[in-house]
Image (cartoon, rainbow, N blue to C red):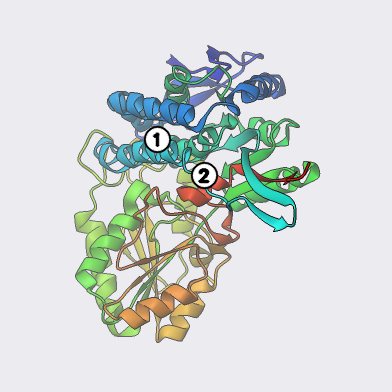
């Protein structure tokens, strides 16, 4: 059994109570490590360390912060095999896909924010009142309390700490209780290049996260998680008027028109729907197909799930590994047990008879708009399919959920694509593709998918505050 520790003020430390949680490898269902189950006293220590470090880090120059982040990116890249192995053991992620699809973007994102640190934009100084010159200062907000999810532990950690630290803030980050391993490892690497206390990682369960977001010290709290968790965080932060950044759930519509390249669409949707075992807020799991090609698309997606999407252990050449944890495994199985009688399961439909938390890649056709499988996040390797008649119905069905994170449209007609892009009530629209993300573009949603942006200059600016300074030219 491995033993994880918190990372506070530049050192690995146990929780003050000595309590731990047991970490399970979802590919085997077996315990492999323990992690601290931290309490309020542990959070207090981390917050104190961050507050002290902030007084120094906020006065660092943009070039100093850039150099530190570039060194961190280089160090993580040089130890990529280690962090991939840690992430795979903790999450069950396929090693090949994690190596090609997660680590390179993650490193690039750190380097992007390293550059963003030296590219703060604002209005030029000017005389907006006679005899007075005004200018804008953009400053770090202070200590940031952050909570990350279990579906992309190391990448979502980067999305949190990289812009915050680049802007001059200090961080106390609480990873998911089921997947803290890669975040603690990353913090150890970061500690070699940052002043003590700039990055702190506190492990624990739900009460630990609650202590982080309710603590008096953070000027800003940021969470990637469920709608329920986001609402609780927003309510808690409101009592202290803290700034809040929320990236919550999603239920992305994937709209396929009659004129689409169906073979390409099916292959692209299958990858984007089953990647990371469907545990992605932007996953292409809610497919809407125009009636003229509906049955053909159902057959193509069923074929993809049955014949093209390999399932297996992390060290195998597969696309789908296990779902992340026992609770999620039971949740996905519950959805499969409750498929309504009017729907057709055309591929998969059950858990696999093996150790670990494996669900067969599943395709369910003929679902209706009010079915729970359409309205709620399944967050597993399950693609649903609905039929629509025309563009107006496609828009109504697409927007007819409480989420607003991501969407895609598949068509050869430019006008159709542009009209759908305008009509979609989602923060991201892909055209004839689904799921690519780049550091330079913002990621964030509308409605119950939250507010604030990750990545891009917009995400960077979320971790800054604006101050107006006016000087008397005759003073």
Q: Is residue 38 visible?
A: no
**Residue 368's x, y, as percent?**
48, 75
Tell me the SS state at disc 1: helix
Q: Residue at x 30, y 76 (%)?
A: 411
Q: Residue at x 73, y 50 (%)?
A: 132
Q: Residue at x 38, y 37 (%)?
A: 111
Query: Which residue was labeled with disc 1?
Result: 91
Q: Nearer the viewer, residue 6 or 69?
A: 69
**Residue occupying the far front of the picture:** 474
Q: Nearer the viewer, residue 386 or 76?
A: 76
> Are circles 2 and 1 on residues that touch, CB within 8 Å?
no
**Residue 108's x, y, as percent?**
35, 40
- Circle 1 Cα neighbour tier, 10 Å, few/some/many (<14 / 14–19 / ≥20): many
In the picture shown, does residue 104 fall above or below 74?
below
* Residue 409, quarter of the rendered image: bottom left
The C terminus appears in which quarter of the rendering?
A: top right
- Circle 2 Cα neighbour tier, 10 Å, few/some/many (<14 / 14–19 / ≥20): some
The N terminus appears in which quarter of the rendering?
A: top left
Q: Residue at x 56, y 57 (%)?
A: 449
| Real-space CA distance between mark 2 and mark 1, rounded to the nearest whole angstrom | 36 Å
Q: Is residue 285 left or right of residue 270?
A: right
**Residue 187's x, y, as percent?**
47, 23
**Residue 310's x, y, as percent?**
23, 48
Tell me the SS state at disc 2: loop
Of discs 2 and 1, which sits in the foreground? 2
Circle number at residue 120: 2
């Amino acid at each position: 059994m491995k033993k994880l520790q918190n990372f506070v003020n530049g050192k690995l430390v146990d929780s003050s109570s000595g309590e731990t949680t047991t970490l399970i490898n979802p590919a085997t269902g077996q315990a492999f490590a323990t992690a601290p189950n931290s309490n309020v006293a542990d959070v207090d220590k981390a917050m104190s360390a961050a507050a002290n470090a902030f007084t120094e880090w906020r006065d660092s120059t943009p070039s100093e912060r850039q150099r530190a982040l570039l060194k961190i990116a280089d160090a993580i890249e040089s130890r990529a095999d280690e962090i991939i192995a840690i992430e795979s053991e903790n999450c069950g992620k396929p090693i090949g896909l994690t190596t090609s699809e997660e680590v390179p973007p993650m490193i690039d994102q750190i380097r992007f924010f390293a550059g963003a640190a030296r590219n703060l934009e604002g209005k030029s100084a000017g005389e907006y009142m006679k005899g007075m010159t005004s200018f804008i200062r953009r400053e770090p907000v202070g200590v940031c309390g952050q909570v990350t999810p279990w579906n992309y532990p190391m990448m979502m950690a980067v999305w949190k700490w990289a812009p915050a630290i680049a802007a001059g803030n200090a961080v106390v980050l609480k990873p998911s209780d089921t997947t803290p391993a890669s975040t603690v490892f990353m913090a150890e690497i970061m500690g070699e290049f940052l002043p003590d206390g700039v990055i702190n990682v506190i492990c624990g369960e739900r009460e630990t996260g609650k202590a982080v977001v309710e603590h008096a010290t953070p000027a800003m709290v940021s969470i990637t998680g469920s709608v329920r968790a986001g609402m609780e965080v927003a309510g808690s932060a409101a009592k202290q008027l803290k700034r809040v950044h929320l990236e919550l759930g999603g239920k992305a519509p994937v709209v396929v028109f009659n004129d689409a390249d169906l073979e390409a669409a099916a292959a692209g949707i299958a990858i984007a729907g089953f990647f990371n075992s469907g545990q992605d807020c932007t996953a292409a799991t809610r497919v809407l197909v125009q009636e003229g090609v509906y049955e053909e698309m159902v057959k193509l997606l069923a074929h993809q799930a049955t014949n093209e999407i390999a399932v297996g252990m992390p060290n195998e050449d597969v696309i789908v590994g296990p779902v992340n944890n026992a609770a999620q495994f039971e949740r996905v199985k519950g959805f499969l047990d409750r498929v309504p009688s009017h729907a057709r399961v055309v591929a998969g439909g059950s858990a696999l008879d093996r150790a670990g938390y494996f669900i067969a890649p599943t395709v369910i056709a003929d679902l209706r708009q009010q079915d729970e499988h359409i309205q709620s996040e399944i967050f597993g390797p399950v693609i649903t399919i609905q039929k629509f008649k025309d563009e107006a119905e496609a828009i109504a069905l697409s927007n007819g959920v409480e989420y607003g994170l991501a969407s895609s449209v598949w068509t050869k007609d430019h006008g159709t694509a542009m009209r759908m892009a305008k009509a979609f009530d989602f923060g991201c629209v892909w055209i004839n593709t689904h799921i690519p993300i780049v550091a330079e573009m913002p990621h964030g949603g509308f409605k119950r998918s939250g507010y604030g942006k990750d990545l891009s200059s917009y995400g960077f600016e979320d971790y800054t505050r604006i101050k107006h300074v006016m000087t008397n030219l005759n003073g």
